Amino acid sequence: MEQHPRSIAASLSIGQRLAIRDLDRQFAPLSCAANVAKRLERRSPKRPALAISRPGDGGREFALNDIGMAVKEVLW
C-alpha cells in the first residue's frame, strides 16, 4: 500500500519532522538527532522508510531517500 507524502508527514513526530528538515540527499552526520534518523530508516506500519545511512568518519551518516525528499517538500 503506497502512502501519500502528506499523510506520511502528518503521522511524524516533531523530532522526526525536524530531522527530515535537517537532511537532504547528501549524507551528513546528525550527532544528537542520529537516534531519530535511525528510526526513519526503518519501515513502520504507519509509513515506509524515509532515510538511508552509511558508516562515516565520525559515526553514521544519514540522507533522505526519494520518499523522504517528497515528505520534506510537504513539510516546508
Image (cartoon, helix red, strand yellow):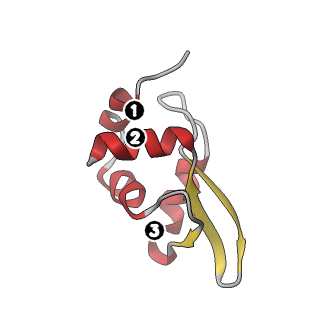
The reply to whether dot 3 and dot 1 touch (C-beta < 8 Å) is: no
Tell us which disc is closer to us: 2 or 3: 2
**Element at label 2:** helix
Q: Amino acid at mark 3?
A: Ala
Which numbered disc covers residue 33? 3
The reply to whether dot 2 and dot 3 touch (C-beta < 8 Å) is: no
Mark 3 or 1 closer to N-term? 1
Q: Is residue 5 above or below residue 16?
A: above
Q: Position of residue 71 (x, y in %)?
A: 40, 40
The reply to whether dot 2 and dot 1 touch (C-beta < 8 Å) is: yes
Q: Which residue is mark 2?
A: 71
* Quarter location, residue 43: top right
**Element at label 3:** helix
Q: Is residue 64 left or right of residue 75?
A: right
- Alpha carbons under labels 2 and 3: distance apart: 18 Å
Q: Amino acid at mark 2?
A: Val
Tell us which disc is closer to us: 3 or 1: 1
Q: Residue at x 38, y 47 (%)?
A: 72
Tell us which disc is closer to us: 2 or 1: 2
Q: Which residue is mark 1?
A: 8
Graded by Cα atoms within 10 Å as few (under 14), some (14 to 19) or many (20 or more), the crowding at tag 1 reads some
Graded by Cα atoms within 10 Å as few (under 14), some (14 to 19) or many (20 or more), the crowding at tag 3 reads some
- Alpha carbons under labels 3 and 1: distance apart: 19 Å
Q: Position of residue 50 (x, y in %)?
A: 53, 44
Which quarter of the rendering shows the N terminus?
A: top right
Q: Is residue 63 above or below residue 75?
A: below
